[in-house]
Each structure stands twice: as structure tokens, then as C-alpha cells.
Amino acid sequence: MRKLIYIPLLLCALFTASAWAAGTQTGQVTKIQIRASDGLVWFNMNGTAAGHPPCAFYNYWMIKDENSNAGKQQLTQLLAARSSGQAITVTGGGTCTRWPNGEDVVEIDY
């Protein structure tokens, strides 16, 4: 009987942990792209990303809302890092809401 109680608890813990999985990457910005048709901003970095959610199967990052103050600040950070060659650390949100195959950026440490 006890085993039957522990199995659902274990499954809940596994699914909860995977739902909160978020990527991270440290390196230099190698490319910034901005699409005119809808304002989509995405960028690439050197180095290897870790912990991307399954939806993010390409090695680029997406600014979640390029029209918000935070999105504009993040783009400014990216431009400064690209211009200076200085490394940044990006943390994702574990989601791909802005574009279906790139992880949304939550934080940029510069």
C-alpha cells in the first residue's frame, strides 16, 4: 500500500522539476538578429547552453517581449556585449513562448 502512495508523489516531483527546467549559457554574443516583419529579436552565443527545455532545440535565445522596457534593456545589453566582446550569462525561462524553438530570455548578466 505504501508503494502505491510513493509512486504518484515521485511522478509529481519529476514532472514539476522538468516543468521548471531552464537553460543557461555563458559566453560572447556572436550574432544578433532582428526581424523587420514582427520585431522578433534573437541571438547566438559561443559556448554550450545547458538545461534548455525540449522546445528549444536550436542554439539561440529569444527576447520574450522586445517592446517591453525589459526587452529593450536586454537588447541594449546584447549590443554592448557584442560591441565590447565581453562575456555575458543568459538564463532562460524554460519556455518557448516568443518563438516555438528558441528559449525565452529571463535574465542577462553583463
Image (tube, rainbow, N blue to C red):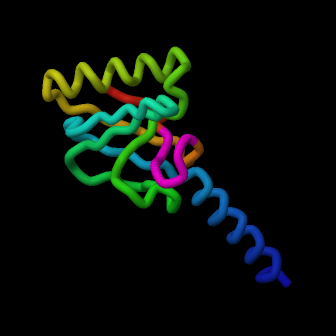
Position of residue 8 relative to residue 3, above or below, is above
Residue placed at 58% from the left, 60% from the top? Answer: 18
The quarter of the displayed image where residue 13 is located: bottom right
The quarter of the displayed image where residue 57 is located: bottom left
Residue placed at 23% from the left, 36% from the top? Answer: 29
Residue 93 image offset from top left, x and y in percent: 53, 42
Residue that sits furthest to the right in the current view: 1
In the picture, the quarter occupied by the N terminus is: bottom right
Position of residue 74 relative to residue 24, above or below, is above
Position of residue 76 relative to residue 63, above or below, is above
Residue placed at 22% from the left, 25% from the top? Answer: 81
Q: In the shown orientation, is residue 84 left or right of residue 57?
A: left
Position of residue 2 relative to residue 50, above or below, is below
Q: Which residues are magenta?
A: 98-104
Residue 37 image offset from top left, x and y in percent: 48, 33
Residue that sits furthest to the left in the current view: 85
In the picture, the quarter occupied by the C terminus is: top left
Q: In the shown orientation, is residue 65 left or right of residue 7?
A: left
Q: In the shown orientation, is residue 95 left or right of residue 7?
A: left
Residue 12 image offset from top left, x and y in percent: 72, 64
Q: Main secondary structure of the magenta part?
A: loop
Which sits in the foreground, 12 or 67? 67
Which sits in the foreground, 98 or 48? 98
Residue 95 image offset from top left, x and y in percent: 56, 47
The quarter of the displayed image where residue 80 is located: top left
Residue placed at 59% from the left, 44% from the top? Answer: 97
Residue that sits furthest to the front in the current view: 37
Which sits in the foreground, 28 or 12? 28
